[in-house]
Image (cartoon, helix red, strand yellow):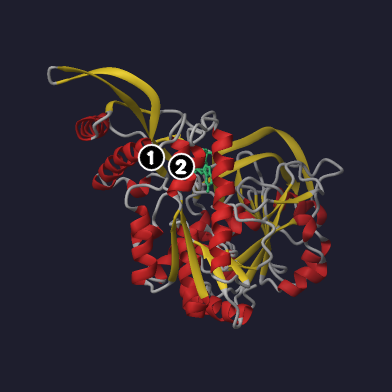
Amino acid sequence: MAQQHDRILILDFGSQVTQLIARRLREAGVYCEIWPFNGAPEERVRGFAPRGVILSGGPASTTEDASPRVPDHVFTLGVPVLGICYGQQAMCLQLGGTVEGHEHREFGRAYVEVQEDSALTQGVWAKGAREQVWMSHGDRVTALPPGFRTVATSEGAPFAITADEARRFYGVQFHPEVVHTPHGAALLRNFAHAICGCTGDWTMAAYRAEMVGRIRALVGGGRVVCGLSGGVDSSVAAVLIHEAIGDQLTCIYVDHGLMRANESAQVVSTFRDRFNIRLVHRDASELFLGQLSGVTDPEVKRKTIGRLFIEVFEEEQARLGGADFLAQGTLYPDVIESVSATGGPSVTIKSHHNVGGLPEGMRMRLVEPLRELFKDEVRELGRELGIPEEIVGRHPFPGPGLAIRIPGEVTREKADLLRRVDSIFLEEIRAAGLYDAIWQAFAVLLPVRTVGVMGDGRTYDQACALRAVTSTDGMTAEFYPFDMGFLGRVANRIVNEVRGINRVTYDITSKPPGTIEWE
Ligand code: XMP
């Protein structure tokens, strides 16, 4: 835990957007953690020593008996508290106000009228202004607790912003953490900086220096192995650990032969040549492709690749003479304890997932230097460490690689064909300046042959599909609306330059109901 930074505690009541509160605070240079509302006993909270507490929104209704409550010690901690939506309602109710269900529910864009000045709105919203916010509530506060006053109202919420400046307790009925509240980030920054007194000392440069010390202290003279995948997380973890312990780190890159064009060469040249990291590059493509021969079921493909990956990794690890620590690029969203959807007391820990699915039985201690970071912070840290933009800004790529983009049996020839299609598509996307606007873009080799005509001759070749989506976390996705000119250009190039492909389609399915990958 980063003890020396000013920190804010976010108590989660189960809102879908709680993580965004943390991201906005981090963007404001403030370290914060998300804990479930019922996982914050007084001792733990005092030990964490937050400069302020934020109560998130949530799906429950305070009008129901079994609904979640704010631990009472939060209100006697002596630090500022900001309640958002459900958090505001629970705070008001517990401090002596009332909350009622109301038939005028507000969902989506709404406007607040700022009636009074307050420390929360200082420098952001002036008295008398009408400002856009994002609302999502059925219940609302109907009477304020003693000491509170109204700062802003909206049509559906007479107490859209409330404040008890003496105790430094604030409540907002809307969601300042979402982008649809245009000045929401500034309000949260005000809370963290002006009200809680955080200095904004959470930067990736500071994190880098601090983490180097922490890795050294943890590892001592031990040896660390790191499974490199070529993706952002394992790359940043490897370079950071290398900065801390140099040659005590060895990276293992298991090349399953199902990477995109030039990716393996790039991994080797970046890590071995540029960063001087000890790197074992194991070309296991024969083994993987051999075992995938005849396999057409997507789940069997995934399991086969996962199993072989572990086998090869363990083999290389043993060849190195073992190690004391295993490095993993686990991120903060993987370790946040989540509140159950009902807001009830059951708490589950999200299962950790990592690119290669490394063995659970491996008896090594873990080094997870990115455990406190969000993806965008990992990218920033990577830039801070001098990792090239092609790696730091890279789209996600699935562990099983191209195998799940080749429906039907996977062969080396098919993988080669797909690599060529994929690289033309990505080249054009980069040339059009669209790469960073897209979450993921790739090609899929279809197990269908279709008739075409080229010159004077008839062709009977394979079809491919192109897929590009926007997303914020991969859980939902929208297909990317390329203009037709762009798609036409890409299709032309593919059919002209890749022998064996005579038809190109564009996948316009969103997720749900489709998934991003085809298998
Ligand atoms: P789907 O296809 O489920 O994919 O919509 C969501 C995101 O997860 C990636 N993905 C994987 N990543 N190992 C990974 O590391 C896997 O087995 C795997 N399968 C899917 C996918 O590329 C997308 O970003």
Where residue 472 appears, as percent x and y from the top left, is 49, 46
Instruction: Answer left or right for 323 relative to 395.
Output: right
Please identify the quarter of the rendering in which residue 36 is found. bottom right
Q: Residue at x 46, y 75 (%)?
A: 205
Where residue 296 appears, as percent x and y from the top left, is 51, 30
Where residue 197 appears, as percent x and y from the top left, is 60, 74
Q: What amino acid is found at the position of numbered circle 1 in the picture?
A: Arg
Specify whether residue 126 is in view: no
Where residue 323 appears, as percent x and y from the top left, is 60, 71
Contact flag, marks 1 and 2 (Cβ < 8 Å): yes
Residue found at the far left of this picture: 456
Specify whether residue 216 is in view: yes
Q: What amino acid is found at the position of numbered circle 2 in the picture?
A: Leu
Sooner in the amino-acid sequence: mark 1 or mark 2: 2
Q: Residues within 10 Å of mark 2 (few under 14, many from 20)?
A: many
Q: How many marks?
A: 2
Q: Quadrant location of the N terminus?
A: bottom right
Q: Name the residue that disc number 2 marks.
A: 289
- Seen from the viewer's position, the closer of residues 408 and 2 is 408
Q: Residue at x 34, y 64 (%)?
A: 269
Q: Is residue 418 above or below residue 253?
A: above
Estimate the spatial distance between the alpha carbons at disc 1 and disc 2, rounded to whole Å. 7 Å
Q: Secondary structure at mark 1?
A: helix
- Seen from the viewer's position, the closer of residues 377 and 241 is 241
- Seen from the viewer's position, the closer of residues 224 and 176 is 224
Q: Secondary structure at mark 2?
A: helix
Q: Residue at x 76, y 69 (%)?
A: 45
Q: Name the residue that disc number 1 marks.
A: 412
